[in-house]
Amino acid sequence: MRKTDRSWLAYGLLLFVMVACRPSEQEETPSLTLADSAITPTLQTPVPQASASATSQPRPTNTRVFRPTVTREMARALDPGWRRLGDERFGLQVAVPVEWVDATPQLRMSELINRFGPQMILLTNNDETADRLLSGEPFEQGALVFGFTSESIRPGTGPEEALSDLLGAAESEGLVPITVEETLVGGKPAAYVDLAYDPLGIFASYPESMRFRVLMVLSPKANTPAVFVIGSPADDWISQRDTFIAISELIYLPETGSNIFEHMDTGDLVQGTLEGALDNIWTFTAQEGSFATISLTPEDDNVDLTLTLIDPAGNVLFTADDGYAGELEVLSDIPLLENGTYLIEASEFFNEPGRYSLSLLLSDEAEFESGGHIEFGQEITAELVPDNRHLWFFKGTAGQEATVILTSLDESFDVILELRSPDDRPIVVLDEGFVGDAEILAGHELPLTGRYAIIVRGFAGHGGMYMLALDEGGESTANFFDVGDLVYGDVRQETLRKDEAHAWFFNGRLGNEVTIEATPLEPTMDLDIWLLDPDLQELVMRDEHLSGESERIEYKLPVTGQYLILVREFFGEPGRYELSLNAEGVDELEIAGTIVYSETVTGILESGRRDAWSFAGEMDDVVDIVLSPLEADRDLVLLLVDPAGNAAITVDAALADSSERLVAFRLTSGGEWKIVVTEFFNEGSDYELLLTRRELDDQRPE
């Protein structure tokens, strides 16, 4: 692994990097052309249905077959009046009108979890409908979608047979015989039936007054079908017709799925097998205030495991993916803040098959001395055991500035610092220093009032001694600011604070003739700029012009490697400036195309060029990006550029021949983002790029 060596900043100066990440969701959908005929609230009557095809052509109104043909890509483009709710990892995700509400957190706290398990979803047209449903009170108007994952089906079983098996108990009890119809949902095999009663006994309080459609959808790569029950009071069924048709068309099933395995108890050690892209889900029940320690160990050396803990409301609490292939992942002494059923998700980073073992330990108190409480003004020295992490909690106030300094006391120990907000969102993850260096978050403004968590861990699960300091404020430590990385053709604007200098990094090749220009955007600014070589030796410095004028460096690079540009104001005064970097003979950005969530694209990177793939993102979307070379000895670099043209993050952590991975990055704004692909030594390479979006709930339930 090649990490960016910026350790020179530790010599008398404090380096800090601030990463602002926030998560959300807003999408668009094609207008749905619906048939004129109504959903008939009688038993076994197929619903006349229009296909939302690419040309939005209506089907003949006399067609009686319910056969939606919306593809996954089409379902992603929703009207502004619609949004997608649920968790696509479990195959329970549906598009509904924006005014609909997600009552799943309350549902998971109800007794239904004992019947259907934690993989459930309940969406209703308003809060009142949700409240009445969950309390068992009747209602005259409203609409609902209840979804769950059914039991695993026999290989080769079709949706019609599977749904008939599911509903067979109702028929055996002397109810009206059930005739199941086959259909398609998003191009996937499905079956449905319309009923004047609730065959599953979910809403038994309304045996006479409700109408339901039971829809089962199969994912070709999962053996646990998804079942959706769409319903409303009988008198409201017709008025909800168009909404129900559209919802049925916009059920989304991912290409991957999840297997639910058996429930775990404290002290259990279980074995499992990952089958390619199919994640494994284990469950356990815990009380508020307890602690969980979970270990996920590969039994095959080539398996790179990811361990995720999800709370009863569906929020992702923690994800462990610190090790290489063949190394275990551990979550130690995780505080559980809710009563209920938790999920443990075991997955393989590259969707490779493999075997693993999983252990669970629940306790009333922290067992491994992995953290505790820290106060402002306090310094703590601790030892991190390999394959462990420490959690330190402190109380903060919205608007308060906090400085966190994590210092390795072992020259071979590479520390990673993470700060989480009171609602369990990652605020900052810092791994910018080299082995033995400090990670520093200076003067960060806290967004909320509540309990914050500082997470300390080592790169690749390594351990060692460290010192953690927490202080209020931080202006005095902010001498140098690692602004980020540049590529040829970049034009960036930044603001210098008082007595601050900026450090910019770029990868250059022997013989590149570079031009660097720093232009003040305020007439009183007098800029100085330096160019340093990969050994941090000064090559050239410019301070030739008066205030308000640009400083320019033209230089032929002597070696291949990572160069450093330093920018400061001569008198240490604050102000804005613009910095540009170009190289003669090196091509500008090449627009390679567009990419959408859950898509894999391939490209051919020409020598000396940069490829840019654009995608539409919404503020607070949480994305994963994997960039893989398809040629030997190629060392790719991944750069994510925001809609304003600023470099949000650069990923250059892997060796040649290995993939660069950006994991769980939150988009800070909506608009057109760009993924820029370069090669460290400006060599050409064929490559593969995968973009996915994670579905994380916006906030924890109160």
Image (cartoon, rainbow, N blue to C red):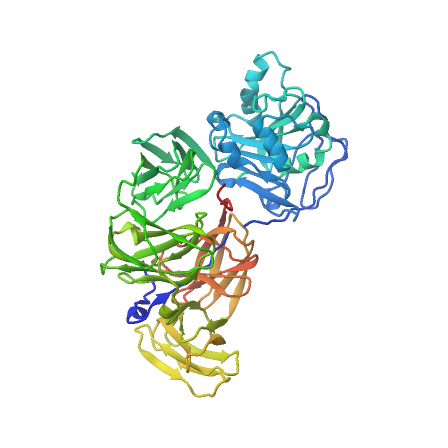
Q: Is residue 553 above or below residue 54?
A: below
Q: Is residue 169 above or below residue 516?
A: above
Count of marks, rendered view: 0
For this view, does 43 lie left or right of residue 426? Answer: right
Residue nearest the observer in this picture, 168 or 334 = 334
Quarter of the rendering occupied by the N terminus: bottom left
Whether residue 603 is visible to the viewer of this picture, yes or no, is yes
Q: Residue 315, percent across and down?
A: 46, 42
Q: Quadrant of residue 497?
A: bottom left
Q: Residue 541, percent across and down?
A: 38, 83
Q: Residue 157, percent across and down?
A: 51, 25
Residue drawn at (31%, 74%), measured in percent from left and top? 536
Residue nearest the observer in this picture, 57 or 551 = 551
Residue drawn at (68%, 37%), measured in percent from left and top? 243
For this view, does 404 lie left or right of residue 253? Answer: left
Q: Quadrant of residue 46?
A: top right
